Image: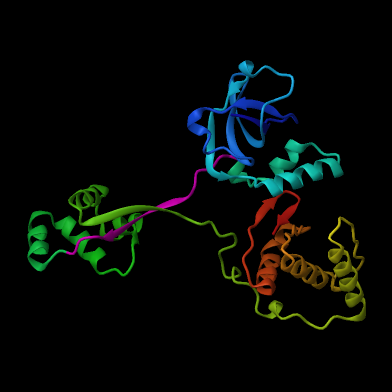
Amino acid sequence: MTVGVHPLAGFDKLLHYKVPETLRDQVAVGSLVRIPILNRLHLGIVGEVGAPVDFPLDRLKTLAAVVYPFTALPPDLLGLARWMSSYYAAKLDGIIEAMLPAAVRNAASLKQEKLLSVVRQLDADEVAALTKRAPAQAKLYTFLAQQFKPQKKSLVLSRLGVTAAVVTALVKRGDVREETRRVERIAYADDWSTGEVVASQPHRLNTEQQAAVDAVARRLAENTFGVTLLHGVTGSGKTEVYLRAIHDALAAGGGVIFLVPEVALTPQTVARLRGRLRRSRPITAASCGTAI
């Protein structure tokens, strides 16, 4: 198996690598991988699966590793990056780097947490014997037995003042289960994360807004590429036109990139979109704004 990789190393060129047998099930278009360039390992995005043209396969280097068990840049976004590179005459590697969140570009590990729960109910005599033999274990077991759902290991250890060895002992005995769960990162998980109630209610459009909404709707209905420029001073109601266009695009099964001109406006803009659309959208912060 051979793949073409877009290296995130400051030069715009597709490099090909052989994929080891052990990694073939994990590699797909859009995967974030580690590749050797000269004497160092760099990150790259898999752009294609297939052999290079006019280059001997036996001279190809081997892919070093797959960073995540999922595609860091889905094929549709990779296609968008290629279109942007052609349309704006920009380097593809720079566009790909801008699309990837900083944590992904830095190969940050997945955020995980360990949870504890009781798997075997002890009777009163067993609890009494455990209390006499290992008071700390009994204290931990009793606490967990009173909970309705698994508890974070770090929080339990801190609250009860026990060590990880106490957990290990109960796990080995089969009384407690320790499991690892991936933590879903929620952008702007604060008081604004559920949206604004007032902004969720569309208001009546004025004549100029209605004309703009109709023009954008016609463009969207054509399902072809086009550019529409809204001209209006601050407070003239352009955002409402954007919101209605976003709603129509999502309802048709499309996607939207919403650029915010000032980073300080990002939280309120996210809240307004969530309130209006009644959904949480993936958010990627970039230097030019925020993609919703």
Q: Is residue 1 rendered to the left or right of residue 138?
A: right
Residue 157: x, y in percent?
29, 55
Instruction: Check if residue 196 falls in the magenta segment.
Output: no
Q: Nearer the viewer, residue 247 or 28?
A: 28
Relative to 102, residue 258 above or below: below
Relative to 81, residue 130 above or below: below
Q: Using the rendered view, name the quadrant where residue 134 is placed.
A: bottom left
Q: Nearer the viewer, residue 35 or 163?
A: 35
Residue 109: x, y in percent?
50, 43
The residue that appears at 74% across and 60% down in the rendered structure is: 256
Q: Is residue 146 rendered to the left or right of residue 230?
A: left
Relative to 39, residue 106 above or below: below
Residue 249: x, y in percent?
76, 65
Q: Nearer the viewer, residue 201 or 26?
A: 26
Locate the N terminus by quadrant: top right
Residue 172: x, y in percent?
20, 48
Q: Using the rendered view, name the quadrant where residue 141 is placed.
A: bottom left
The residue that appears at 86% across and 55% down in the rendered structure is: 225
The residue that appears at 30% across and 53% down in the rendered structure is: 178
Q: Using the rendered view, name the quadrant where residue 88 is placed.
A: top right
Instruction: Check if residue 117 falls in the magenta segment.
Output: yes
Q: Is residue 205 rendered to the left or right of residue 124?
A: right
Q: Which residues are magenta?
A: 106-121
The number of numbered badges drawn on the structure is 0
Q: Is residue 191 rendered to the left or right of residue 178?
A: right
Q: How is the image coloured?
A: rainbow
